[in-house]
Image: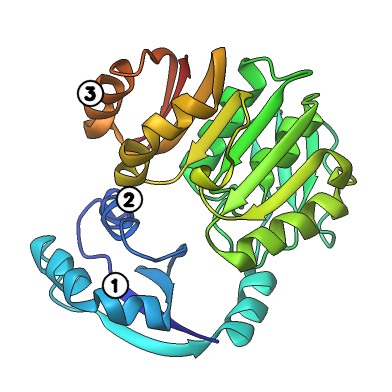
Amino acid sequence: MYYIELSIPLTAAEADEQADILTAWLSEFPFDTFLTEDGCLKAYAPEEEYLSVSEAVEAILAEQQVEEWSSARIEKEDWNATWEADFEPIAIDDLCTVRTSWHPAPEVGLDVLIIPKMSFGTGHHQTTRLMIRHLFEQSVEGKRVLDVGCGTGVLSIVAVGLGAESVVAVDIDDWAAENCADNCALNGVSERVTSLVGTVESVAEQRFDVVLANINLNILLHDLPHYRARLAEGGLLCMSGFLESDVATITEAAAEFGIVPIAQKESDGWVAIAFRG
């Protein structure tokens, strides 16, 4: 399987802010991993899916005044070897550490082991960290949890670590669902996590005490009625994958379904909101 790697030089004075804005726009397309290195934002998408939206991607880059960028066709296996070798452990305050087996265990906090296979949600992105902080603040003990767009399964593993009764984890990427299952086995939580390929619509006729959705604004807005349908009365919905400028849009849309915000967290322009349904 081949991927397309876009390399976009970060030329703005605030390179991190430029990277975040470009990531937010490109997340609307089938890019499933973003890296920032050597002054460039690198975005990766399956080749066939990228080719179907390449003109729209180029139009977005032009709108964002990106004048120089390059693309390369790479094999997934080769990329994954580099991704694994470069993976660095992530500490979310003293609450949680996301690491691989070749990094030392933390002295404090929840220890989450992953096999980093390029799935979104390793903990490196601000939105994953914000979601983890919400999980620590909002009780999930004894709760049934739905993790939509699970990626590596980090949020599912954290939820079980905090006492969740069970988790259903879904992702449209079959490789992500497989990686999630592998990571759950690595952490000894497979009996409480079911990993599926699909969307929130694939989880029919079930109700959950907690729904987690760390995706992007357009998908969140589209799937809100499905989150409402899957959420038990009075349940907790945590959403992220959008910028501060989108807060009013997402909260107003949620209000139409009787879902009200109870807590909000921000980091580098990104936001995660906990709602009560």
Quadrant of the image for the N terminus?
A: bottom right
Residue 144's spot in the image, x, y percent?
Answer: 71, 26
Query: Which numbered tag is attached to residue 248?
Result: 3
State the CA–CA distance, disc 1 to disc 3: 30 Å
Q: Residues within 10 Å of mark 1 (few under 14, many from 20)?
A: many
- Residue type at numbered disc 2: Asp
Residue topped by disc 2:
20
- Residue type at numbered disc 3: Ala
- Side (left or right) of 245 relative to 35: left
Front position in the image: 92 or 149: 149
Front position in the image: 118 or 219: 219
Front position in the image: 77 or 219: 219
Q: Residues within 10 Å of mark 2 (few under 14, many from 20)?
A: many
Residue 57's spot in the image, x, y percent?
Answer: 22, 70
Q: Earlier in the sequence, mark 3 or mark 2?
A: 2
Residue 250's spot in the image, x, y percent?
Answer: 29, 28
- Side (left or right) of 269 relative to 44: left
Quarter occupied by residue 273: top left
- Residue type at numbered disc 1: Ile
Q: Secondary structure at mark 2?
A: helix
Q: Earlier in the sequence, mark 1 or mark 3?
A: 1
Q: Nearer the viewer, mark 3 or mark 2?
A: 3
